[in-house]
Amino acid sequence: MARLMYQSDSTRQHRRMARRHIRLCGQIKGAAKYGQAMQPKLDTLTEKENEKLEAEELCENALDDLTLKNATLDNCIRNVYDIIRIYDRDNLTDFITVLFPNNRFTDITSLPVTEEPLEVVRLIEKLKNAEDQNFVLPHIDSLTAALNSVNEAIANRQHANENLSRRQANEELARNDIRAQYEFNYLDARKDLGKQRVELLFPKVARKGSKTKKDANNNITEE
């Protein structure tokens, strides 16, 4: 019996088997209709796979952008920490412990990327309460700009991930359709062409390292 498609088969395997099936149908008299029925399913799967691959690339781009923008935000936080320490030393103040209670900027920069923005908002609010606004204003502006960039990157990544999930689901639906058509073609062609001739329409998919032999009906099979 022909080897049907399995859900565990890769998309590439689905396309490969369908393409070979279509080609074989075009070479056997009376079987063209099966290839014609399969072609739209193959076209759709190819389209949906390409859309998924495009979405995967967009996800990678979004992650790269977020990584870079988060690094910029971390640098801004580190700069604020270093400058406030100098300010405290020169003015005999202890503003650093107001901004960074544990005297560590890493309490913020080591947070997960989606949690860090909230702490940066709190840091900015503390800076706004500083007595020397002329000193802290440039740092508030740089932090705010970096924070906005990170928030935008987080939103873009979430959108990219959601888009990828939709396209993965569309690809899976197309895989289901092509498997169903493949099985339907087998059952229908078996009634029309008989048990032996139907086997000629479906490719013998070799497993890695497998050997081929002929069965009692002279069909090529795998050991």
Image (cartoon, grey):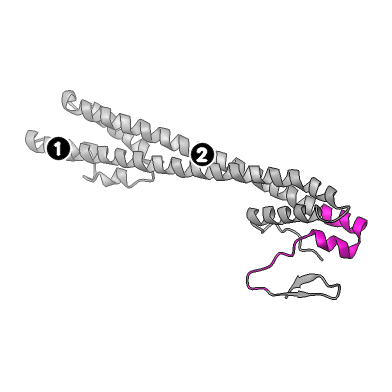
Q: Is residue 122 left or right of residue 52?
A: left
Residue 158: % across, % down: 49, 38
Measuring from the top left, give residue 71's x and y in whole percent. 31, 42
Residue 97 vs residue 36, the one in the foreground: 36
**Image quadrant where one finds the C terminus:** bottom right
- Where in the figure is residue 47, as x and y percent of width and height? 64, 42
Query: Which residue is located at x 71 percent, y 53 percent?
Result: 19
Is 29 located above or below residue 199 in the figure?
above
Please state if 115 lies on the left or on the right of 54 as rendered.
left
Between 120 and 197, the one nearer to me in the picture: 197
Q: In this view, does 146 lie above or below 181?
A: above
Q: Mark 1 points at which residue?
A: 94
Main secondary structure along the magenta-highlighted residues: helix
Please provide the residue range marked out in magenta.
Answer: 185-210
Res. 160 mark:
2
Q: Which badge, 2 or 1, comes first in the chain's sequence?
A: 1
- Asked which secondary structure carries label 1, the reply is loop
Q: Mark on residue 14?
A: none
Q: Position of residue 167 (x, y in %)?
A: 61, 42
